[in-house]
Amino acid sequence: MTNQPVVPSWRLTRTLALAGGLVLACAAWFSVGLIVRTPPVIGWLPLLIAVPNAMLTSWRAADHERTMWRYVSVGIVLIGLGAAGNAYDYFSGSQEGQHISGWTSAIYISGLAAIMWGLLRIPGVHRSRIEWLRFGLDNATMIVTVLTFAFHLIYPRWHSWLGDSVAGAITVLIVIVSGLICVFAFIKVAFTGTGPIDRRALHLLAMTGAVGTAGGALAPLLASRPYLNTAHVLLPTTCFCLCIAADRQLRATRAGMPEPRPATRRLSLMPYAAVLATGGLLLFSALTHTSDLVAIALGSVTVTVLVAARQLVALRDNTLLLDDLDARQRELAHRATHDGLTGLPNRTVLVEEINAALADGPETVSAALVDLDDFKEINDDLGHAVGDALLIAVADRIAAQLPADAVVARLGGDEYALLLRSGDHAAILAAIAAQLRLPVHAAGHELVVEASFGLAPARAGDTADELLRRADVAMYEAKGQGKGRQVGYTAEMDQRTAEQSRLAADLRMALDTDQLYLLYQPIVAIPGGELFGVEALVRWNHPDRGPVSPGVFIPAAERTGLIVPLGAWILEEACRQGAAWLYELGDASPKTVTVNVSARQLRESGFAGEVDAVLRRTGLPPHVLTVEITETAVFDGGAALTELKAIAALGVNIALDDFGTGHSSLSLLRTCPADILKVDKSFVDDITEGGQHAVVTAALIHICDGLHLRAVAEGVETAEQAAELHRLGYRYAQGYHYARPLPATEIPAYRPPVRVTV
């Protein structure tokens, strides 16, 4: 709930005191006039103060809602001018008693019309056609009711009051219009809300109209006292009520207007009250045999017909409302069980279907999970609209390949789940994979999609959750093997998953308890073997297990996302050490410090900014740092390539690791901002024996020379390999032939172990 502002309590202001004092004075003078004849001019003089006072008060209330209150200000001024005209008519002798001239009546009516127009301009609540029809019927009901009572009040005195005067008829019209103002104000509150107008202020304004109606109805009673006029009391009292309403609006505005509220349903009792009122009047007229019985009967019947019509409209409205509620309930039920984007069933429906299938017999039941590869890059590069269009297209293609008894659900993100009951389940997944590899048109883009599939056959005693868990394990195994793979669940996967989970928990603790440390493998210049740079390699000494191989804990870190904080620690530590060597050794320090960065780190938004921040904190010059990536990390471009280009723009060197073992696309050397090409150990192993590896190794050095890249041969273990690499044109190498990874303290003392002769 929002806190509604509290309107300050009422207090007597100078404006209200003046308006109230005028009412008391005029009422007292009017009472004296009912007993003895009084000078007429004294009754008109207070109006010269009451009207300007009311006008100024309502004008100040226009600070918050300008339109309505300013129209009210104009209206009260016009009514004041009408009162002046009324006085002129009396003193000039052109009219007698309560009668007024046509011009004076026109001024009065203009003032009332201005106030009516201001009420019409109050912003209301949005309504349907049926609600507006009901509003019109209620409005007509109240107007007919007021006209009926006004006619009953005026008719018995019609001839004694009006005679043959046309001006008298105009006076009657003014009384009726004043009553309509009062009625309309109440109806506006009841059916359209008050918008920026304070609700109680509008109630008080409606009271102003009621006072005008009641006072005007007293005019026939003063036919025997022509020196008195109802305006003597009516207008000051109306101005006083207007001042109270404007003061309420001012206090509400200063407190902060609450949110507009539509009226409550209890106000819809007004039409039924009108039926009771006109019916009661008809009964009274029939019992007393009044001469206006037929007119009252006509008014009562009209009110009854209007209310009956309103009931029919309300009945129709309720029927439509019930239909709408039923449709909304169906829609809500569908939303609760289906994905809002693709329209596929959600996990709730899938679990129910799997449990039902398992209850019928698990022998032919399988669950499969489908996860799109590199979907995040599509979202990041092309936007969520394209990603959403792709998800819809993928859902359609999966559904088109399934048997009639299968179920496909979207679990969230880019993950789908399948319940398979019949057919060759592996063949079904293969057909889906083949369809997904066809170009997909999504929001103006043509995309090629690959997905990883995990398949888990059901076993006796399975639950839906257990079956989906095994399918999830198989799907992650497929992702670990590469893109576009299909893997069936085996028990060994659970063991590996459990082990990786335990390992990840230990690794998280290792990051916080200094169990990790870095070793640095020298990168040397050949043929001499002089130190050129180092590559930072992380090691883990577990307190219970002892040394844990990077080949074990790095995959666990990749799977669990810990590779991001682990990589951040390695980057910070390596840069800190590189800056320390530069400070201690000067020109003898390593020319480059290489840090391996995972594909997951590159996909993190703002990774280039993190690299820049580390360089600034540690003081390491950007040209000393080399970021080493695998070619698969940026082969598909996207956010990873964008971050890599931002890193290169800092002045950091970029090295492509294990080149030739992945996609091996030469176009990558054109799109990737690489400075260094690291030739994989598998090509170096057999280089002295000739054959295909030697040919590839020779070709790579020519490519590097042509593209002005620095080539580094990895895994050099013998002097013969080093000599052959130098003969082919390689000038940098690393491997056990030169040094194993060393602690940072041993790098300054490094010396080439062997002088290679070529």
Image (cartoon, grey):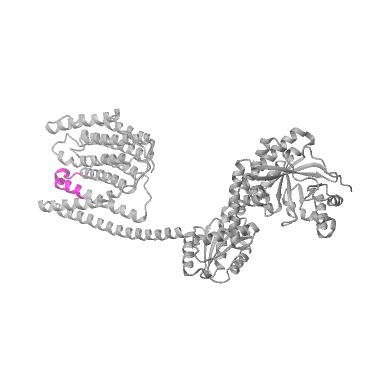
Q: Position of residue 6 (x, y in %)?
A: 34, 36
Figure check: 48 above or below 368: above
Horizontal side of 169 relative to 406 (left or right) equals left
Q: Position of residue 495 (x, y in %)?
A: 59, 57
Q: Residue furthest bottom?
A: 423
Q: Quadrant of residue 666?
A: bottom right
Taking depth in this image into account, of 734 and 568 the one nearest to the observer is 734
Asked if residue 549 can be seen in this view, the reply is yes
Q: Residue furthest left?
A: 288
Taking depth in this image into account, of 158 and 670 the one nearest to the observer is 670
Inspect the magenta stretch and tell me whether residue 209 lies in it: no
Horizontal side of 50 relative to 506 (left or right) equals left
Q: Quadrant of residue 10?
A: top left
Q: Which residues are magenta?
A: 148-166
Judged by its main secondary structure, the magenta piece is helix
Q: Residue furthest top?
A: 14
Figure check: 246 above or below 567: above
Q: Quadrant of residue 417?
A: bottom right
Residue located at (32% from left, 58% from top):
318
Q: Residue furthest right?
A: 758
Asked if residue 443 can be seen in this view, the reply is no
Q: How many marks?
A: 0
Inspect the magenta stretch and tell me whether residue 162 lies in it: yes
Q: Position of residue 11 (x, y in %)?
A: 29, 30
Q: Position of residue 254 (x, y in %)?
A: 37, 34
Horizontal side of 742 relative to 30 (left or right) equals right
Q: Which corner quadrant holds the N terminus?
A: top left
